[in-house]
Image (cartoon, rainbow, N blue to C red):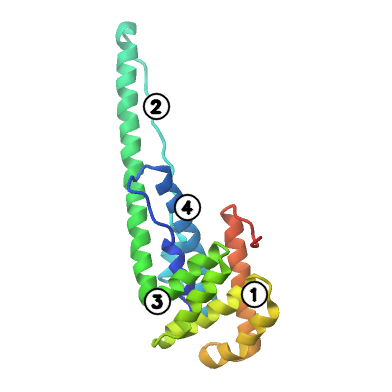
Amino acid sequence: MKRLLFVLACSSPFAASCASQGAREGATQGALYGALGAAVSSVVWGRDDVLGDAARGAVVGGTVGGVHGAANEANRKAAEDARNAQANDRARLEQENRELADRNRQLELEQRLMQEIGPDNTEAVRKLVNCDHQGAVLAARRAADSGDEHFRTAGVWLEAVCAYDRRDLSTARMFYPRLAELDPQTATAEDAELKVVQLVTTLEDTRQSFGLPRRCQ
């Protein structure tokens, strides 16, 4: 389950225009998912080499350069306008290039996640971050029925995290003994509970750091 939340790197579709507001919002969500994915992977599997890249997902901001006045007052305004246009064009191009690089990075991270935890867990993580617990549980249960052992284990972890995140503690506790059996790095049900609590705390901290409510309404 270490890569479970790494899927978060690419939950949102990006707009066709690199410079659009939609693209910037997509980059923000990519950074949110990447940061959470890196933290969760570290908690459960103790590995954050791949996911660390997601945590460094960027929210791109543009800057516009200034201009200097011309000595000749008659031509000063025209020269200044031309320089401003050039500076704006350069800044816009630089921002578009940064956003394009960010989207490409997010796509690469998503592909890694899909390979490591599977498409169903990828969907579950996205829904979890956005407080769609029902959708997250349904996706995680599909993963739990997967023929891939790693995908199955990650799906069970996600179900436990979903239950705890909505403060259904009795349901969450039902998963701890099973996780201790499935995950060789989790020795006891108590260990599983500690990891789930840590994951939910990470989830809440990450939401808050990006200006979202810590807990779902």
Instruction: Tell me if residue 184 can be seen.
Output: no
Compute the Cα span from label 3 to label 4. Answer: 23 Å
Residue behind mark 3:
118
From the top left corner, tell me how far across and down residue 175 is, in percent: 60, 85
Other residues around mark 1 within 10 Å, as few (<14) / some (14–19) / many (≥20) = many
- Comparing marks 3 and 4, which lies closer to the viewer? 3
- Comparing marks 1 and 4, which lies closer to the viewer? 1
Q: Nearer the viewer, residue 7 or 41?
A: 7
Compute the Cα span from label 1 to label 2. Answer: 52 Å
For the residues bearing labels 2 and 4, Cβ distance under 8 angstroms: no
- Which residue is at 31% across, 46% downward? 97
Instruction: Tell me if residue 208 can be seen.
Output: yes
SS type, badge 3: helix
Compute the Cα span from label 2 to label 3. Answer: 48 Å
Residue behind mark 1:
164
User: In which quadrant of the rendered view does residue 74 lie?
Assistant: top left
Of labels 3 and 1, earlier in sequence is: 3
Compute the Cα span from label 3 to label 1. Answer: 22 Å
Residue behind mark 4:
28
Compute the Cα span from label 2 to label 4. Answer: 27 Å
Of labels 3 and 4, earlier in sequence is: 4
Of labels 2 and 3, earlier in sequence is: 2
Number of callouts in the render? 4
For the residues bearing labels 1 and 2, Cβ distance under 8 angstroms: no
From the top left corner, tell me how far across and down residue 141 is, in percent: 50, 80
